[in-house]
Structure formats: structure tokens, C-alpha cells
Image (cartoon, rainbow, N blue to C red):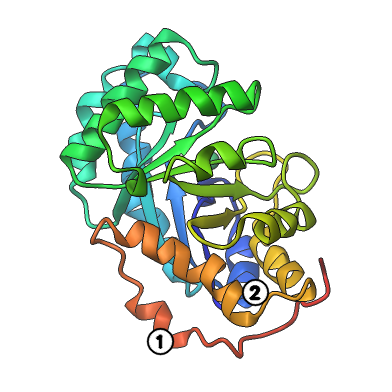
Amino acid sequence: MRIFDPHIHMTSRTTDDYERMAAAGITAIVEPAFWLGQPRTSVGSFTDYFDSLVGWEPFRASQFGVRHHATIALNPKEANDPRCREVLDLLPRYLEKDGVVAVGEVGYDSMTPEEDEVFAAQLALAVEHELPALVHTPHRDKARGTERTLAVVAESGIEPGHVVVDHLNEVTVGLVRDSGCWLAFSIYPDTKMSPPRMVNILREYGLERMLVNSAADWGRSDPLLTRTTADAMLAAGFSEDDVDRVLWRNPVDFYGQSGRLDLSDVEKEATFAGNSILRGGS
Ligand SMILES: [Zn+2]
């Protein structure tokens, strides 16, 4: 089994995680730039962080047989801090880099006017650089946040097929489905989406434009939940081809729109026969 986790923050994870992921078949990942918990007070902190996302982290991943790409943006939370605003001027330089496959995470945290402005500016950058955009939806007031997100996306002129709206659930899936954007779901150990809930959504809404990620970061999260979801799909009667579509071909199709996705190393290794060490663990 081959698995592509399209949203995971490996900067916050250990080498043990990389080893366990590779053993479970998770051999391709995208790491979006995000909020590190501790507020950053200057643009220089972002420069160092972005450099590690396109330099050190892909190197570290490669030591464990995992192919790493990144998305770059000023995250919604820090869009509210005037000290971070200059990050917008830094972005064009990073959006030209080979390993950068989208603008992201952009979108809303608390839905402030500052977030409006930074979100729209970054969607414009995505259009200008002909890159897809990864859009985070707020964890509070999700339905209203998702509606507003889709309105800003529509206004920006970006093609809906170039946008993935992330952290969806049963309440917001229908809204995004009708917009033509891609739909992403973050599977967490105890809050938000779980593997069984994800399987139900796939049953109801089908596999088209669907992405599943672990969004694992510095909080309580689990980098193997993409694999657990794949196993739950098989147990629920989905075929191996269905699993491959949602957990490999869909993210390849979405991020492949950047023209920069290079999976030549891992595609050779990945076979569907794969290991089954986690089978039944869902
Ligand atoms: Zn994230």
C-alpha cells in the first residue's frame, strides 16, 4: 500500500515518526507552513522556517525513504500580527522554489479584517505564480468560516480546481463539494474527524476530489492516521484501487498541478502489495 499524506507538519515530529510512517507505506508527504505555537516576532524567523521547509526537512525525510514537498504562506493566525506582515514580501522568492507545490496554509483563524486582507493577497499570489492553494478552515464557527472562505476564493478568480479546502467535517463537506474546490479532511486521535467518520463521508460523497491527511503537528495528533483510514476503508468494503485513489492518486493529481511534484524516487519502491503491519488496527 502506498500513502501520500498531503498535510503534515514534520518539523514538529521525530525521526521515529518518519520510520513508522515509511514502514506503514507513507512515502510521500506535503508539509504546509503554519503557526509554530510560539508567536514569531520578526520576518527573519519566517525566513529560517521557510528555508528549513525547502532544505533541511526534505533532506531529513529522504534519510527514511520519504519524499517531502512543502507549501509556503503566512498562516491565518499570524496574519493578525503586524510584525509578521512583511512576510508577504518574502513569499514570491519561496513560491519559485522547486520543492514548493502550493501556497498555504492560508485562510481564516478568527475571521478578522487582517485575515481577510492576507488571505486575498495570498490567493492573488497563487494565481500569479500558477500554484494551487491550501486553505485552512477555522476550528471554531466552522460552517460560517467555510462559507466566507468559499466567497473569498470565488472573488479571487483562482480556479476552484486549484484550491483545496481543509479540515472539513460532516457539516461543511456539502458546501465545498458544490464549489468545485478539492475537499480535505484531517483525521485526529480524539477530536474532529476519526477514521470511521471519514469512511462514512467517502461512502456518502464518493472519492472524487477527496483528500485525507493527518495534519500531525506539535499538538495531540498521529502521523499514522492516514494509514489507519486506509485500513478502515478496506474493512468497510472499499477496494484497494479506491484506497490508492484517495490516499495516493488524488493528492498526486492535486499537487501535481504545480508542475513540481517529483515522486520518481518513491514511486519505484511503492507497490500495492506493501506491508500490512497495521492492518486491523483501525
Ligand atoms: Zn496544518
Provide residue 251's location: percent of width, then percent of height: 45, 61
- Closer to us: 161 or 264: 161
Q: Quadrant of residue 89?
A: top left
User: Few, some or many C-alpha atoms within 10 Å of disc 1 (few <14, some 14-19, many ≥20)?
Assistant: few
Does the Cβ of the disc 2 residue fall within 8 Å of ligand 1?
A: no
**Residue at disc 1, secondary structure:** helix
- Closer to us: 180 or 99: 180
Q: Quadrant of the N terminus?
A: bottom right
Q: Residue at x 79, y 74 (%)?
A: 235
Image side of residue 87 versus residue 190, left or right: left
Does the Cβ of the disc 1 residue fall within 8 Å of ligand 1?
A: no
User: Label 2: which residue?
Assistant: 24
Location of residue 230 with respect to 152 vertically, above or below = below
Image side of residue 4 versus residue 127, left or right: right
- Cα–Cα span, label 2 and label 1: 16 Å
Location of residue 5 with respect to 81 vertically, above or below = below
Provide residue 126's location: percent of width, then percent of height: 25, 39
User: Few, some or many C-alpha atoms within 10 Å of disc 2 (few <14, some 14-19, many ≥20)?
Assistant: many
- Closer to us: 111 or 206: 206
Provide residue 82's location: percent of width, then percent of height: 36, 10
User: Label 1: which residue?
Assistant: 268
Q: Quadrant of residue 158?
A: top left
Q: Quadrant of the C terminus?
A: bottom right
- Closer to us: 195 or 264: 195
